[in-house]
Amino acid sequence: MSSPQAIQSAGRPLSAGAIALMLMLCLTWGFNQIAVKLVLPEVPPMLQAMIRSMGALPVLFIVGSLRGVKFFERDGTWKAGLIAGLMFGVEFVLIFQGLRLTSASRAVVFLYTAPFFVALGSYQVLSERLGGTQWLGLAVSFAGVALAIGVPQPNVDSHILLGDLLIVAGAGLWAATTLVAKGTRLRFAAPEKALGYQVATSIPILGTAAWLSGETITQTPSPLSLGLMAFQAIWVVGTTFTLWFALVKTYSASKLSAFTFITPLFGVVGSYFIMHDTLSLTFGAAAILVIAGLFLVNRPSSTAAAPRDALLNVTKT
């Protein structure tokens, strides 16, 4: 599954523009968690995710059509697109079901194990290698996230452990979707088309999950909820997810995924200003850990820049 493009991007350092774009994406995704929570009293989670996908699909089609994307052209990407779509839909089902069983602080820590899955998968699938410094950076960043959100309490029951496992499974699917987008023919598709596969496939999956869970909307959502739903559909899914897949096609999946560690930190800051949560000196220490970890991950490494058996992998498909 390796390709010359994958090998070239494995050692490519993130440009200043890519770093700035990733910071914007993480800021958006951090606030998105707050938006979801604000809408939950009026729109249940599975229905909220389904409506978000339904609203994002026409946005992707319009933007892609303006850019000349041929959505229905036979280019050999439909199989990979369907696989990515199935994982995309099930990912959100697992995460939301896990949130019903475990605490939010535990969930966010376990969800951001995804970069570890990406790093492991990138080594096996994409011939991307992280050196010791990069692995240390991943560990330091994750420690910062755990410190900022709060180290999970040891006294848990089987229900909480099951919720933790569901969240980890969701993180694994998030990572797997990134690897599919990077390591299959889907990497040749336009970002709007690659994401369109996933959004379209997730709609029936999330709708079925909502039906099985007995979710209903009992009242007309308020203008605030409708605005936040539009924000999720048009900006979060329709725009930022598209930008994410565009970056994945160009740069190292491992290094990009490491930046997602910043997302929960932005979420904590957003919660402070919007939901009036309190901040402490712990957050300052956590932010330093995350920034230091990202510096280590993106530090040039001779090991990372020269994947093992790279010349042999050039001929593989």
Image: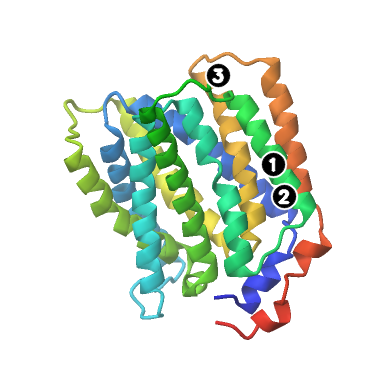
- CA separation in Å, label 3 and label 2: 33 Å
- Sequence order check, earlier mark of 3 and 2: 2
- Total numbered labels: 3
Q: Residues within 10 Å of mark 2 (few under 14, many from 20)?
A: some
Residue 137 screen position, x and y as percent: 74, 45
Identify the residue at horizontal 48%, vertical 51% (top origin).
172
Q: Position of residue 143 (x, y in %)?
A: 67, 34
Relative placement, left or right, of 11 versus 194 is right
- Tell me the residue that label 2 is attached to: 135
In x, y percent, where is residue 154? 52, 23
Q: Which is nearer the eye, 292 or 52?
A: 292
> At x 20% / y 37%, what residue is drawn?
213
Q: Residues within 10 Å of mark 1 (few under 14, many from 20)?
A: some
Q: Which residue is mark 1?
A: 139
Element type at mark 3: helix
Q: Residue at x 79, y 63 (%)?
A: 303
Q: Is residue 127 above or below residue 74?
A: above
- In the image, residue 98 above or below residue 255: above
* Three-letter code, disc 2: Trp
| Cβ atoms under marks 2 and 1 closer than 8 Å | yes
Mark 2 to mark 1 CA distance (whole Å): 6 Å
Q: In the image, is 208 to the left or to the right of 202?
A: left
Mark 3 or mark 2: which is in front?
2
User: In this image, 20 relative to 41: left or right?
Assistant: right
Q: Quadrant of residue 201?
A: bottom left
State the residue position of label 3.
273
Q: Amino acid at mark 1?
A: Ala
Single out the mark in the foreground, 1 or 3. Answer: 1
- Are dots 1 and 3 in contact, CB under 8 Å? no
